[in-house]
Image (cartoon, helix red, strand yellow):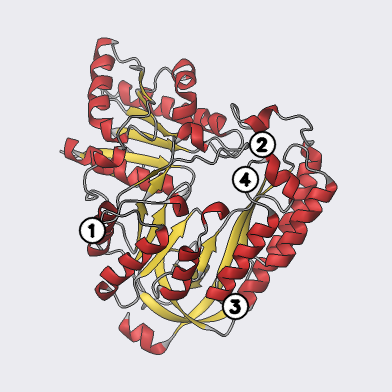
Amino acid sequence: MAKKLFIKTYGCQMNVYDSARMADVLAPLGYAKTETPDDADMVIINTCHIREKAAEKVFSELGHWRIRKAEARERGGDVTIAVAGCVAQAEGEEIHARAPFVDLVVGPQAYHRLPELLAKAERHRALASGKGSGVLDTEFPVESKFDHLPEQVATPPGPVGFLAIQEGCDKFCTFCVVPYTRGAEYSRPAAAVIAEAERLIDAGAVEVALLGQNVNAWHGEGPDGKTWSLGRLLRELNDRFAHKHPKLRWRYTTSHPREMDDELIAAHRDVAGLMPFLHLPIQSGSDAILKAMNRGHRAEDYLRIVGKLRQARPDIALTSDFITGFPGESDRDFEATLQLVRDVGFAQAYSFKYSPRPGTPGSLMPQQVSDAVSTERLYALQALLQEQSAAFNRACVGRSMDVLVERPGRQPGQLLGRSPYMQSVVLNDPAVKIGDFITVTVTDGHANSLFGDVAGASREAA
């Protein structure tokens, strides 16, 4: 009888990808993934360490599972509890100290070792009369985990497939924990990426998102033995697989301004399946703050890249990330951020107050900005970004665009799709189903979503 595996995923799309691969690794052991935690035999909490109080949120979640585990034991069973991801990497010893009932703590580089770690945890648990085993693996191996992961077979991708092509980070931004939890930058060989893309498409994906902590830092070995760039890879993927679906789409995230080379910018002009959308974080519009963050570029460099992108693809939609209240940020620095936002005009953006991450240089910097000031600046920034997002969406009203239907909406009968510009599109049409590619006429635009009607011919095709 198959055992039930429940995975709760926090954080970015890289974590979504990792969760799917952990399910693949455990499938040969008889674990079948379930979408509900009821009667789960194993629970994996796949964590993210980017946001404030990430570790405390994990311990809060574990408190819930401690009760579930005790209830299962009263019935004569058990629940294997594992903590994975970046909090596991950074706080592994603390997790075992504060939550000794946790059976397994595993970092992002050790997922391919899950079967042997699980067996070790089960042996230790039996010897310890049901107590947590204390199995911990947060080592950074010499070899890449990608060399040992099985083919993606356990979790059908649905209409959108995630494909990690790069991980780790060598940028060492002073606010970020990723270099310490994900390790050095690593690019998968092009042949491995191409093979996994084909498996995803053959399994039903009609949109493939290439993922990485700094995905445009990807420089992998090509089949010709030469080092390819991301722009070269995108051309190859589109040329090789465009025949498999007439509207096959490609995206990539998350990018760094230092890695936006001319070949990648040209791909936005030339690769038909590459969507007119780019998430390109800048974090601040102040050169002084960008230097303190160790971003390695200036505001004018970012604006120059934006100009090249819009020249190559005039309809491209840009999104970004911003931090307010970084140590030393003055009113003048914050105004520079607001001015950059006005100059660029974003379709959407994510903004956060700075929160010191333990072990990062930023947490030790003088001139920490007060929470009150950071909050005030965040609200002002968000108001401007929300205004731009609403204006971008309102400008889409009356347009027809191809929408990929991805998942159910919040209301009964609703479905949500994605436009080429990564907007959520709300649909109310009983003839449409998840996985359909349909032409939609946009009828209304709000700050965070569009509403649309399905064109008659597209409805008949669906």
Quarter of the image that includes the N terminus: top left
The residue wearing badge 3 is 444
Q: Give the class, few, some or many, for how many residues have Cα within 10 Å of label 1's Cα (few <14, many ≥20).
A: some
Measured Cα–Cα span from mark 2 to mark 4: 17 Å
Sequence order check, earlier mark of 3 and 2: 2
Quickly name the residue at label 4. 295
Q: Secondary structure at mark 4?
A: loop
State whether residue 302 appears in this view: yes
Residue nearer the viewer, 134 or 340: 340
Whole-angstrom CA distance, mark 3 to mark 2, is 36 Å
Residue at horizontal 43%, vertical 41%? 185
In the image: residue 164, left or right of residue 426: left
Q: Which residue is mark 1?
A: 199
Comparing labels 3 and 2, the label whose residue is closer to the camera:
2
Q: Position of residue 145 (x, y in %)?
A: 30, 37
The percent position of residue 212, horizontal first and vertical second, equals: 43, 49
Q: Look at label 2 and name its amino acid.
A: Ser
Task: First in sequence, mark 2 or 4: give its number.
Answer: 4
**Mark 3 residue type:** Asp
